[in-house]
Amino acid sequence: MRVFKNKWFHRWARREKISDALLLQAAEEIVAGQVEADLGGCLFKKRLPRAGSGKSGGYRVLVGYKKPNVERLIFLYAFSKNKRTNISEKDKTALRLVAESFVSSTEKELNELLNQQSIWEIKDYE
């Protein structure tokens, strides 16, 4: 499975000190069906713990992924639960379109996005 993050998520994760190792672990859980919500259209919500605390006071991340295809997954958006309870229907619709576009992308299109630094691939270096 290949795991990616978009430009916005890459900046957010760096600012919040979310490690790639934690994201890879979350990706494995998502593929195993451990998600908080299936938002439809290849969009899923997953909890991530905040450093030093549990998942309940942590972050909510939105991920593009097509079940049961485990070929690729992308982290799209995140928010802190204490700052925002959920996202709007308008945001969900937009993120569904992005998720569906990503999972249906060709390898050539993915490589172009990587070269443009619109997305980053998360690799396990351990």
Image (tube, rainbow, N blue to C red):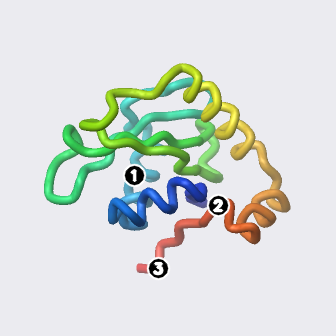
Q: Name the residue nearer the viewer: 32 or 9.
A: 9
Q: Which residue is mark 1?
A: 26
Q: Mark 2 to mark 3: distance in Å?
A: 18 Å
Q: Secondary structure at mark 2?
A: strand
Closer to the N terminus: mark 1 or mark 3?
1
Q: Which residue is mark 3?
A: 125
Q: Mark 2 to mark 1: distance in Å?
A: 18 Å
Residue at the extreme top of the image, as rendered: 89
Q: Secondary structure at mark 3?
A: loop
Residue occupying the point 37% across, 31% down: 36
Amino acid type assigned to the residue bearing label 2 in the image: Ile
Residue 16 in percent (x, y) is at 34, 60
Which numbered dot is residue 119?
A: 2
Amino acid type assigned to the residue bearing label 3 in the image: Tyr
Q: Secondary structure at mark 1?
A: helix
Residue occupying the point 78% across, 49% down: 105
